[in-house]
Image (cartoon, rainbow, N blue to C red):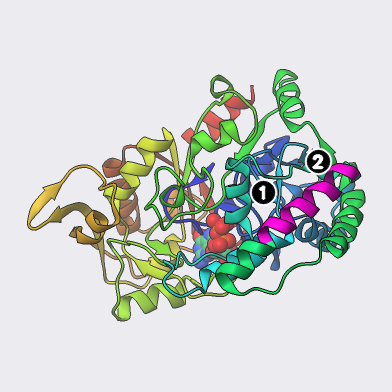
Amino acid sequence: MLGAQWGDEGKGKIVDVLSGAFDVVARYAGGHNAGHTVIIGGQKFILQLVPCGVLRPDCLAVIGNGVVLDPMAFLKEIGKLRELGVDVDRQIKVSNRAQVILEYHRMIELAAESAPGRKKIGTTSRGIGPAYEDKMARNGLRVVDLLNEDLLKTHIENACREKNTVAQALFGTHPLDPARMYEEYARAAEQLRPFVTDTAELLNQAIAAGKSVMFEGAQGTMLDIDHGTYPFVTSSSATAGGAITGTGVGPTRVGTVIGVTKAYVTRVGEGPFPTEVHDRAGEVLRERGQEFGAVTGRPRRCGWLDLPLLRYSNMINGTEWLVVTKLDVLDELPVIPVCTGYAIDGKPVDTMPADVRGLELLRPMYTELKGWRSSTEKAQRYEDLPEEAREYLSFLERESGAKIGMISTGPDREQTITLPAFEAALRALHA
Ligand code: GDP
């Protein structure tokens, strides 16, 4: 299950709703910048690193090897979950191959993001990008190495020597003290140790034993390091392919791909956004949809549903099912514009431009659909939705090329419509 747009599609809620039917939920990419919001019986949970499945007592929550883990952030998050009565010690497993975010990753990201002349990506400054950089440069520290005191000490000493020099020369940053850092991380490692295991083994054994596993995407397709609006992207593979490399479960073991899309579009941070609206309509979406970042509180940019983008996302991910969230946000609009195609200089564009300039030149072509101007929040079945809302959804389904399996009309678990065909398909997967 992954985000079909730029993240914040409401994946947290949907994973939470569906996880009731899964034995395991595994995160495969990103770090503690995900910020899934789940509301259960009016109580709000914000999960940044731990998969949302953890809120179901029978569900095992796995942090896969594709994730970058900040041990301090992890311990803080599980501390909060423990206070809420979650049995974290039994329910959470962390990959021994996941990369560790260290203090200097944060230091460098913070300094680089505010340095003059640098392109602002709008990162959350949690060290996630620099940790992935070190991973790819084969310079990273993995969880398994964090647990080895000698290795940890040497790694921190060597890395600090290099990072302090670079950060001071480029940004004039105050150097970090490797001895203090080692003490802190060695202490955190001991608390982390009981959670650590070979999660690729664990997941493959679970699947072999007939258990069902859901892979929980973070961010969204258009933020994917390869397929997104580069360079305004995240540092990992947010798309379906990431679930494979980020967990160690082979592609032939994956039963289906579910894309989560809002009934409109939002984006946080910088970068191209073809259907963005800057007028009052954008504010209405922001206010009704409460479009402010779960982690950073930043207002999200809002725009109309973008079908070429959804088609692109469905192609990249091989999406079979769509979950449409936040339909209720459109409840009061008399007409709803939907982008059905793009043009550059009046000429239709069939493929998603790879470059930022091309993306910025895109002019969306809109079709106006009739709004329903009534509440969808209490609908329990597809048939309960107003006729215009059903037409909006069938238009989306027809034009996007994937089947709608679920519709969300509010933040609560109860405000979810599951279509019978989707329910049957999930049951068949579990069989
Ligand atoms: P995620 O990162 O994809 O899980 O998305 P976020 O948690 O950042 O943002 C989704 C927000 O929308 C959260 O505050 C949810 O509680 C809320 N939400 C999810 N589904 C719906 C819905 O159908 N309608 C409304 N109004 N809010 C929703």
Give the x, y percent position of residue 45. 70, 63
Looking at the picture, which amino acid does disc 2 mark? Asp
Q: Residue furthest bottom?
A: 280
Q: Which of the labelled discs sits on residue 378, or is there none?
A: none
What residue did someone put label 1 on? 68
Give the x, y percent position of residue 395. 27, 48
Residue at point 57%, 36% (across, down): 243
> In the picture provided, is 275 more to the left or to the right than 53?
left
Q: Which of the labelled discs sits on residue 145, or is there none?
A: 2
Give the x, y percent position of residue 173. 65, 73
Q: Are marks 2 and 1 in contact (CB under 8 Å)?
A: no
> In the picture provided, is 346 more to the left or to the right than 35?
left
Question: In the rendered view of the protein, which quadrant contains the C terminus?
Answer: top right
Magenta residue span: 150-163
Give the x, y percent position of residue 212. 67, 29
Going from N to C along the chain, the mark reached first, 2 or 1, is 1
Most common SS among magenta residues: helix
Q: Secondary structure at mark 1?
A: strand
**Alpha-carbon neighbours of circle 1 within 10 Å: few (<14), some, or many (≥20)?**
many
Q: Quarter of the image holding residue 19?
A: top right
Residue at point 36%, 73% (across, down): 332
